[in-house]
Image (cartoon, grey):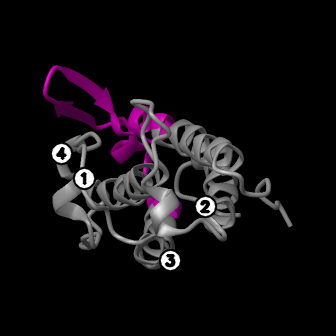
Amino acid sequence: METKSTRMLGILPLFDLHTEFYPKVLVGITDEDAHKRLDTPANHVAWLAGSLVQQRYDLAGLLKVAATSSADELFKNFQGIKDGQQYPSLEIFKKDWQQITPLLRTALVNVTDEQLDHILEFPGMKMSLWDLLSFNIYREANCIGQIALWRRLLGYEPMKYM
């Protein structure tokens, strides 16, 4: 695989793995079940799925990819879960995932070391694009794992890897 930055050689295989796991972890979950929190304050499947999509769109935006997710208003600026909010269907999130993923992947292949070293400023923190990208890859794995746990808690079969 050729990338403009050798740092991306460790990130892209994880990105590709998460790209495959995202639709697999959502297989069969109904939109009704996706909103269940089982009497806990935990983020439900719909929020987790949507926040992952938004995260890819946000990262793509930082890399100058002009695209907006279907649920941008619900998730932009790192908004947390909203009690009583009906989130879009998992099918909408899957379509958004399919739309942004190839655009973002191309941007990641072409990102330069100079871009990765650029310091981003968010309310209360500063970090390089590299640090944000590294965190995002970690968070994707974490959220997919949370959805996999929700599958079991909601009575679904485990996620199929193949």
Secondary structure of the residue carrying numbered label 2: helix
For mark 3, what is the residue? Answer: 98
Horizontal relation, residue 146 to residue 93: left or right: right
For mark 4, what is the residue? Answer: 77
Q: Residue at x 30, y 27 (%)?
A: 127
* Label annotation for residue 22: 2
Secondary structure of the residue carrying numbered label 3: helix
Q: Count residues near mark 2 (Cα–Cα under 10 Å), then give few for <14, some for 14-19, many for 20+.
A: many
Q: Earlier in the sequence, mark 3 or mark 4?
A: 4
Q: What are the residue bounds of the magenta stretch?
A: 108-135
Name the amino acid, label 1.
Phe
Say which of 117 and 14 sits in front: 14
Name the amino acid, label 3.
Gln
The quarter holding residue 50 reads bottom left
Q: Residue at x 23, y 35 (%)?
A: 120
* Label annotation for residue 7: none
For mark 1, what is the residue? Answer: 75
* Tag nearer the camera, 2 or 3: 2
The quarter holding residue 25 reads bottom right
